[in-house]
Image (cartoon, helix red, strand yellow):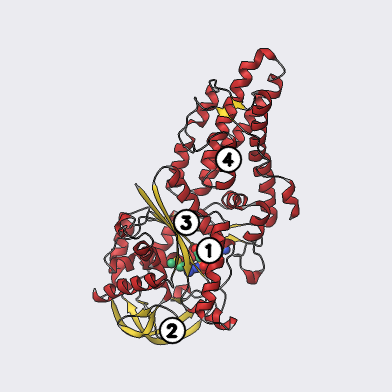
Amino acid sequence: MSYYITTPIFYVNAAPHLGHAYTEIAADVLARHHRARGEETFLLTGVDEHGEPVTLAAKAAGVEPQELVDRNAERFRALTGLLEISNDFFIRTTDLEHKRLVQEFLQRVHDNGHVYKGFYEGWYCPRCADFKTESEIGPGNTCPIHLIVLTREREETWFFRLSAFQERLERLYAERPDFVLPEHAFNETRNFVAQGLVDVSLSRASLAWGVTVPWEPTHVFYVWFDALLNYVTALGYARPGVSLDHLWPANLQVLGKDISKFHTIYWPALLMAGGMEPPRQLFVHGFLLGPDEAKMSKSRGNVLDPFAIIDRHGADALRHYLFREVSFGHDGPVSEEGFQARYDAELANEYGNLASRTLNMLGRYCEGAVPAVATDAALREEFAGLFARVDELLARAELSAALEEIWRHVRRLNRYVEEKAPWALAKDPDRAGELAAVLASLAEGLRVVTVALLPYMPAKTTELLDALGSGERTTREFAAEGWGGAVSAIAPLFPKGSSEAA
Ligand code: MSP
């Protein structure tokens, strides 16, 4: 079985920020989860380099667009590395192969009769690169996302006959009740479509920075069509010799709510127009907000800097925080204080401490090995269904609910230590058997939660699994018995002191 998952591709007009990191991490957690299940997994990410936002930024910086995108694409690539994203390919829409395949696909859409030449007149947000419909315009002709005054555009354009796909889209939505998750995002899509779709610009005559329209070489494709197609063009050259159908339709496409219209409406219509299947599922996540509950943005000065956090605490702590703090699929505020609080309470105290205590006690009382004895039956019972429940939740991309489920088990293990008080058992030679069983149970419970946490915190969990003597073993099977072998001590996984550097 294969699993193909994508992130949106990022505009390179500005520096990467936490909102970008959020989408990437979400997709990465799911990709790692599917890999751990033994599925052939392909995670695609990359950058969106054409269009007005980039043209405007290049002009402001006094450089050619190509120079700007070359420089900024590297910053996004660096971010994926720092975040521990396990992407299998990094697409740039300035790749020659991408451009050629965009032309090929859209020529087919043209030949299939889904485009026509006309004149566009209407309101446009250059920051969204979006032609706004009446219902999407804020007070005083403003963009509700960027809060800037919209520009009036009037130009010759090739239209994509989106309106002709109204019924087919409605049928798709009706047949596939989980095409878009979560439910509230799907409702918005259906409401938007129910208002009646209008045709959209496919080409721009006034821009030069983009993919040339083969049948009208003075136009370039409207950046959204060029960008959306990355999800299929990448499959055409990322893995030479592997056919596109091997991974298409994508299993899951992750995106933020600001770009839901493009992905849940334009995208399936465009694919149909080119004779391809729509993706299997789309997940629309919410916004990370500043502590003031406004969307994080540089201009508002409420940005939590992912680079600074990674620098101090590593990527795992950030990855954990985002899905613990904000319920995935909803909006929620994040802050420096919130991060510190969760770091101290959950990572340093609950999980980090559990790990150190368990390894220390195995060192002290069991000569550094997990005793080969039967584990606690009651505890085993409580842990038995964990992987199945996590699987079930992650199959619906419920990242926060799955993490909560795992965390309940971390807390259960801490209570188990308190209840059993191994340090007291160790004082009584008659209870050596009990002590061995308690520590073997703890080691096993710790291994299980750590394997479950691996997709969320790949670096620290790998370190801990190594210390627990797992070697190459990253199996997700619940093997309560037969677990054993030498363990080694490690430095605290989430040292408390480092949080004070803030
Ligand atoms: N280039 C387009 C996407 C094209 S995909 C074919 C674009 N790029 S973007 O860089 O502006 O945004 C990329 C992703 O980052 C989007 O999913 C967006 O929702 C996400 N985020 C940007 N700011 C965000 C927050 N403050 N919070 C959460 N995610 C947000 O749109």
Quarter of the image that includes the C terminus: bottom right
Residue at 68% across, 56% down = 336
Type of the residue with mark 2: Ala
In primary-sequence order, the first of circles 1 and 3 is: 1
| Drawn side of residue 74 relative to residue 164, left or right | right
Which quarter of the figure has residue 311? bottom right
The outermost residue toward the top is 430
- Where disc 2 sits, the SS reads loop
The residue closer to the viewer here, 55 or 156, is: 55
Contact, mark 3 vs mark 2 (Cβ under 8 Å):
no
Amino acid type indicated by mark 1: Arg
Which residue corresponds to mark 1?
Answer: 77
Is 187 placed left or right of 62 in the picture? left
CA gap between label 4 and label 3 equals 26 Å
CB contact under 8 Å: marks 1 and 3: no
Distance (Cα) linking label 2 and label 1: 26 Å
Q: Give amino acid for label 4.
A: Trp
Q: Is residue 139 visible?
A: yes
Q: From mark 3 to mark 2, how far is it between C-alphas?
A: 31 Å
Of circles 4 and 1, which is in front?
A: 1
What kind of element bears circle 3? Answer: loop
Query: Horizontal and vertical percent for residue 33?
Result: 46, 46
On the image, the x and y values in percent for residue 501 come to 75, 54
Residue at the farthest left position: 112
Q: Considering only vertical position in the picture, is 285 above or below 96?
A: above
* Numbered badge on residue 208: 2
Cα–Cα span, label 2 and label 4: 52 Å
Q: Please report whichever mark, 2 or 1, sits nearer to the chain's N-terminal start.
A: 1
Identify the mark nearer the N-term, 2 or 4: 2
For label 3, the residue is 87
